[in-house]
Image (cartoon, rainbow, N blue to C red):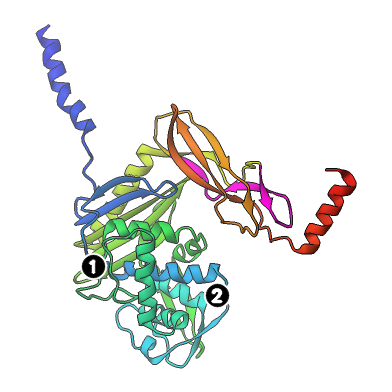
């Protein structure tokens, strides 16, 4: 009997230890691991501490560029005039020549692959006329997505005492950027030559070496200055789960990589994403008041997903809530919501939109509709 008691006592510390919060990314001053589709934080340490982000700043720079592309304000084939100010940027650069013109597609590659400060400034000036106006928009966007510990002074991340962010805020920015999946085309390129108008080329090698070695890793942005130390905002996808990790103020590039891998391995080993409904699912129709059509099909704004521990198998139900809406209504406009329920408790609410936009009916449309109603009696 004594042997059994002793054995149980020997096992007890191991069992208790298994329940404790893991200690990950120990070399980083601050770190975080987030699941992309749900925004759930899987691990964090000093995630709200204000620190210098170095070139991770360019996550927000890229976000505003991708928004402009998605909104049709610019095209990747557009040419950008390189100003003397842009060409004079120090730090990491691709040595753009003042007075030359470069396509936005090439400047995006320079930012995403080579972390080019000159390309970042060129795009800021092209989009908003000046760096100061672009930085103003950067800070406005940060506030809009919920960042509370961020203040940007520049577009590239060179040290400034008033230029700071946090691991948590960086994860929020990365999650927002990942809404534009095209950015991963650029951040996943390992090496490429940048051809310039004068016929010369600059060889660019991705500053994020992990994209070549870690399964599923396809972005996002490294950073280093003497003040910031070695930093990395990374993202990787396996099956239907995408993770975002951030490590800040590492002492060397090896610890930056090792801590990033430790965070990602922890996430993929312990969690999974279950898709309850995806955006392709037909959710029925909604009545359109005074529209060119009377009804329109519904779809989710985003996939309905939940995060589970790797060995869990939970059951969920959902309810759709919509009411008639007035035209005009565009794709993306919220016309209702879907409640996801587990054991009778709502655990998630997802917005519903229309499958296609509907314009407001004009007088001729209403006349034809009323005339048809009179003829058919319906």
Question: Which residue appears farthest toward the right when viewing the image?
Answer: 375
Q: Is residue 298 in the magenta section?
A: yes
Determine the CA span between mark 2 and mark 1.
31 Å
Q: Which residue is mark 1?
A: 52
Q: Is residue 353 left or right of residue 1?
A: right
Rendering coords of residue 288 (x, y %): 67, 51
**Which one is in front, 277 or 117?**
277
**Which residues, given as a range, are shown in magenta?**
285-306
For label 2, count other residues whose C-alpha is less than 10 Å away and answer few (under 14), some (14-19) or many (20+).
few
Which quarter of the figure is the C terminus placed in? top right
- Depth check, mark 2 against mark 1: the one in front is 2
Rendering coords of residue 323 (x, y %): 60, 45
Q: Residue at x 47, y 33 (%)?
A: 341
Q: Secondary structure at mark 2?
A: loop
Q: Which residue is mark 2?
A: 73
Q: Residue at x 57, y 50 (%)?
A: 335
Rendering coords of residue 185 (x, y %): 50, 63
**Which one is in front, 116 or 145?**
145
């Amino acid at each position: 009997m004594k042997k059994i008691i002793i054995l149980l006592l020997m096992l007890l510390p191991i069992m208790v230890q298994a329940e404790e919060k893991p200690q990950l990314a120990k070399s980083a001053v601050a770190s975080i691991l987030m699941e992309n589709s749900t925004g759930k934080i899987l691990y964090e340490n000093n995630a709200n501490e204000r620190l210098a982000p170095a070139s991770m700043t360019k996550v927000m720079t890229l976000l505003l560029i991708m928004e402009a592309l998605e909104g049709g304000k610019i095209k990747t084939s557009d040419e950008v005039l390189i100003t003397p100010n842009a060409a004079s940027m120090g730090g990491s650069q691709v040595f753009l020549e003042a007075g030359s013109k470069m396509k936005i597609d090439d400047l995006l590659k320079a930012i995403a692959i080579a972390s080019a400060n000159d390309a970042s400034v060129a795009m800021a000036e092209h989009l908003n006329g000046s760096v100061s106006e672009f930085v103003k928009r950067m800070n406005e966007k940060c506030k809009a997505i919920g960042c509370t510990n961020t203040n940007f002074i520049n577009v590239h991340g060179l040290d400034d005492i008033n230029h700071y962010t946090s691991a948590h805020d960086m994860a929020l920015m990365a999650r927002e950027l990942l809404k534009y999946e095209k950015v991963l085309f650029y951040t996943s390129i390992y090496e490429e030559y940048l051809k310039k108008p004068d016929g010369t080329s600059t060889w660019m090698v991705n500053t994020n070496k992990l994209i070549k070695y870690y399964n599923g890793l396809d972005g996002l942005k490294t950073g280093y200055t003497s003040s910031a130390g070695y930093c990395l905002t990374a993202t990787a996808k396996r099956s239907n789960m995408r993770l975002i990790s951030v490590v800040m103020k590492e002492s060397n590039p090896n610890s930056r990589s090792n801590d990033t891998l430790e965070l990602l391995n922890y996430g993929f080993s312990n969690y999974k994403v279950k898709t309850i409904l995806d955006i392709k699912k037909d959710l029925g129709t909604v009545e359109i008041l005074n529209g060119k059509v009377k009804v329109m099909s519904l779809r989710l704004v985003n996939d309905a997903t939940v995060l589970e521990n790797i060995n869990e198998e939970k059951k969920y139900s959902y309810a759709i809530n919509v009411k008639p809406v007035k035209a005009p209504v565009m794709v993306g406009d919220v016309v209702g919501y879907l409640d996801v329920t587990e054991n009778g408790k709502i655990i998630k609410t997802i917005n519903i939109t229309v499958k296609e936009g509907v314009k407001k009916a004009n007088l001729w449309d209403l006349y034809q509709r009323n005339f048809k109603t009179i003829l058919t009696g319906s």
